[in-house]
Image (spheres, helix red, strand yellow):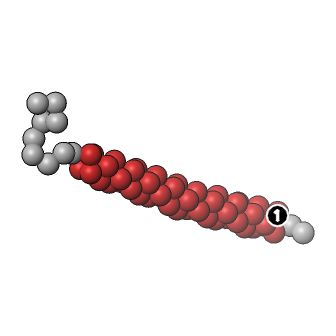
Amino acid sequence: MNVDDVVAARIEAARIRIQAAKRRREELAAARKRGLAARHATKLRYLAAQQRDETRDEIPGGDPHV
């Protein structure tokens, strides 16, 4: 094995490491995005339920303390 072969092998190994790191970053970004969307959906469901409960608790005809 000569120097050129060693250099080529190191370059190929570096390329593989770079591609693997890029793939990991993309997977983590996708998971982060899914998690954020899930948290937002949960919050919106909670707020909608809270608003429905407040609307249900209102007494028609005005102030109940009169």
| The C terminus, quarter of image | top left
Which of 64 and 20 lies nearest the eye of the viewer? 64
Q: Is residue 9 visible?
A: yes
Residue 44 lies in quadrant? bottom left
Viewed as shown, does residue 5 lie left or right of 37?
A: right
| The N terminus, quarter of image | bottom right
Q: Is residue 59 above or below residue 31?
A: above
Residue drawn at the location 19% of the way across and 45% of the way down: 59
Viewed as shown, does residue 33 lie left or right of 57?
A: right
Q: Is residue 47 visible?
A: no
Image coordinates of residue 65 in percent, x first then y, are 16, 30
Which of 1 and 39 lies nearest the eye of the viewer? 39
Q: Is residue 58 above or below residue 18?
A: above
Q: Is residue 13 above or below residue 36?
A: below
Amino acid residing under circle 1: Val
Which residue of the protein is positioned furthest toward the front in this rendering?
Answer: 66
Image coordinates of residue 42 in percent, x first then y, are 44, 54
Which of 12 and 64 lies nearest the eye of the viewer? 64
Image coordinates of residue 17 in percent, x first then y, are 70, 60
Image coordinates of residue 41 in percent, x first then y, are 41, 57
Which residue of the protein is positioned furthest toward the top in this rendering?
Answer: 65
Residue drawn at the location 55% of the way across and 59% of the way down: 31
Q: Which structural element holds mark 1? A: helix
Q: Which residue is mark 1?
A: 6
Which of 16 and 43 lies nearest the eye of the viewer? 43
